[in-house]
Image (cartoon, rainbow, N blue to C red):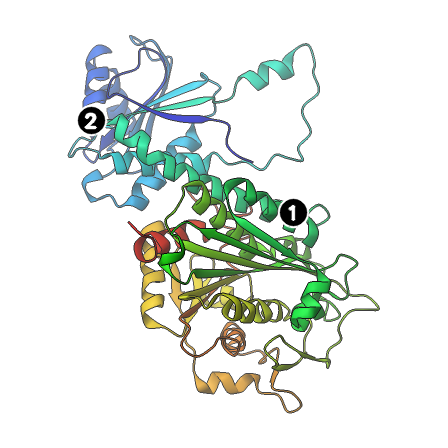
Amino acid sequence: MSDETTISFANLSLPPEGVAVVLAEDGPKLSSAAKDLDKESKGLLSRAANISGFKGKKESTVDLLAPAGLKFSRLVLMGAGKTADYSAEDWLNLGGTVRGMLTGKEGPTAHIVLDGASKGITPEDAVNFALGAALRGYRFKKYKSKPKKKNGAAAETADKTLKKIVIHTADPRAATKLYASARAIANGVTLARDLVNEPANVLGPAEFAARAKELTKLGVEVNVFTPKTLQRLGMNALLAVGQGSARPSHVVVMQWKGAGARAGDPVVFVGKGVTFDTGGISIKPAAGMEDMKGDMAGAACVVGLMHELAQRKAKVNAVGIIGLVENMPSGTAQRPGDIVAAMSGTTIEVLNTDAEGRMVLADCLWYAQDRFKPKALVNLATLTGAVMVALGKEHAGLFSNNNELAGWLIDAGNATGEKLWRLPLGPKYDKMIDSKVADIKNTGGRWGGSISAAQFLQRFVKEGTPWAHLDIAGTAMSSVDSEINRSWGSGFGVRLLDQLIRDHYEKH
């Protein structure tokens, strides 16, 4: 759910009261604001830092409640390390760390004074800090019952929430202007997180499509394809995955035309949207199956990205395509050994019905190229557990037929902290998916599982189309806690792909 705490910017000055956060760097070297407060309190901050052994190291703190000689209800001296060496990601993470400390119990408004001990803090730094705070503030509380009122206690608790964050910085006007774009990014990530966190009984293919349709309010052109249209298009691989479910499959095509017709062909993003994956007839073990509500995180990212681009009115022509299915076992489900013809005409031998995401993507990738002739094609999918065995949860797997596009994506990942690691493709791996009875089979066996899955997808990429596949199984759902996220769904990919677009596809 979107953080209801508002974030604003103000002049570089000390607040008179309330909750205040000031910075210190390695040493500790107090910022100007911290020095002023130390002087006003007759050395309180210095003494507290000395007693606690505080040296200004990153994420260390001196936390004072009702500090003597000051009117604050709470004063935090936040260690920042060396801000002169900070990257955008460092400011993002510092903002998340500070936001994680603020509960609202000591006051509804928190004032954060951003001035460095060793260098000036730019409007861009302040905005990255604010974005980190906004992302960390996310909570998915939709299904939490409100506490029952007891002697007015519930109302009192509700009032003790953080309502405002005021960031004091050297150029608040410039920061405010820049933050409009950052706020759009936060909203896109929030939407992606909300979709991933929803339970599958609430969010099936039709309901997901309806959420995507809401982007029309922002000026996105949205078309929803129902099974009859999918049959006419020949998307038999996608339909085969969903044929065991009582909930019909859908494909959603979202177009943002922010650069106009003269900008030429769009960049296209394709997302796997398996709203729940039992594995089908090749059913998964019961332990952990509840996590398969998040098997649509690729589609969630694409919807969040399209929302973000439209909200900030990005000067780019971008298309988002999501394949929405539910993979269930039933009397109508596809069987191991079935052979289906994809939209491209390629025949697929289904060896394992749990290797379903690649079949969904196969038809969506082919449609994307047939319909839009993209200048670049990027797909995202929680595709394989094998990628987590290889990379853990710190990097998503990257596969690409184009070195330039792969390099751009890696750079975008390093800039945003949504990091990628490139894995190989090659003819010998490709042989792993050759079938004796069809053109290809949908699994290459145990070894190199994430690679053979990528080789499968590459069979549906036309020669000359720059393409990248991001396997986000380890980073998009059941995500590790970070400075900017404490949610089960991370919204991984929205910031990464926004950075790619800003750097290489957007008209400036």
Mark 1 Cα-neighbour bin, 10 Å: few <14, some 14–19, many ≥20: some
Residue at the spot 53% in from the left edge and 79% down from the top edge: 447
Q: Measured from the top left, where is residue 173 in percent x and y? A: 27, 27
Q: Is residue 400 above or below residue 181?
A: below
Kindly indicate the quadrant of the structure image that contains residue 9.
top left
Kindly indicate the quadrant of the structure image that contains residue 420.
bottom left
Q: Viewer-nearest of labels 2 and 1?
A: 1
**In this rendering, does residue 491 appear at all?**
no
Q: Callout 2: helix, strand or loop?
A: strand
Q: Callout 1: helix, strand or loop?
A: helix
Q: Is residue 218 above or below residue 235?
A: above
Q: Callout 1, which amino acid?
A: Ala
Residue at the spot 65% in from the left edge and 87% down from the top edge: 438
Q: Measured from the top left, where is residue 47 in percent x and y? A: 24, 19
Q: Measured from the top left, where is residue 273 in percent x and y? A: 61, 58
Q: Callout 2, which amino acid?
A: Leu
Q: Is residue 230 above or below residue 184?
A: below
Q: Which circle marks residue 23 in the picture?
A: none
Q: Is residue 325 above or below residue 47?
A: below
Q: Which circle marks residue 30 in the picture?
A: 2
The one nearer the camera, 146 or 12, is: 12
Q: Is residue 120 left or right of residue 225?
A: left
Residue located beneath label 1 in the image:
210
Mark 2 or mark 1, earlier in chain: 2
Q: Is residue 76 left or right of residue 378?
A: left
